[in-house]
Image (tube, rainbow, N blue to C red):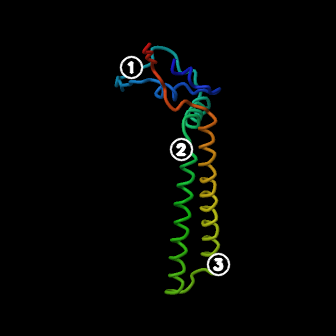
Amino acid sequence: EGLAQFPEQNLFLRGMVPLVWYKSEIVYYKRGERFAGESKYPLKKMISFAIDGITSTSAAPMRLIFWIGLIWFILAIVGAIYIIARHFVNGSDVAGWASIMLVVVGFGGANLLALGVIGEYIGKIFLEVKQRPRYLIEDFINED
């Protein structure tokens, strides 16, 4: 019943079941060896399945890009401060190397940061377009 409330076309069932079930518990068990044969899922299909699972249930990969970009950009700023301070204290090691590296790292971090911000917007649009219900109603009580 709960799954019928989700109007998505590409429904990733393993990611939706925890959202639908009202009470759940974790059951630990020891899995024995396979009785016969081998898995029919090749590695390529398993990777595709994992990517579907990650991308259909959350926008976390886009948020990760934002944080990597922010950290990279902050490291570029700290590196710039270090190289400028080192230049005034010890003099320059290799002319032009530091400035080129800082520009490359700084713009790389800024690009990832901008991509992460755009990804956040796209992630919000992604979740809204799925039109998932905000609440799952288990039962209606009619008091007539």
The Cα atoms of the two marked residues, 2 and 3, are separated by 38 Å
Relative depth, front residue between 99 and 63: 63
Which label sits on residue 96? 3
Secondary structure of the residue carrying tag 3 is loop
Relative depth, front residue between 105 and 92: 105
Which label sits on residue 32? 1
Query: Mark 1 vs mark 2: which is more N-terminal?
Result: 1
Q: Dot 2 surroundings within 10 Å: few (below 14), some, or many (20 or more)? A: some
Residue at point 54%, 55% (across, down): 68
Q: Residue furthest front?
A: 144
Secondary structure of the residue carrying tag 1 is loop
The answer to the question of whether label 2 and label 3 lie on touching residues, with beta carbons closer than 8 A, is no
Residue linked to disc 2: 60
Rendering coords of residue 56 (x, y %): 58, 34
Vertical side of 63 occupied by 104: above or below: below
The residue type indicated by label 3 comes to: Gly
The C terminus lies in which quarter of the figure?
A: top left
Query: Mark 1 vs mark 3: which is more N-terminal?
Result: 1
Rendering coords of residue 31 (x, y %): 39, 22
Rendering coords of residue 77 (x, y %): 54, 70
The residue type indicated by label 2 comes to: Ala
136 with respect to 120 (left or right)? left
The Cα atoms of the two marked residues, 1 and 2, are separated by 34 Å
Q: Dot 3 surroundings within 10 Å: few (below 14), some, or many (20 or more)? A: few
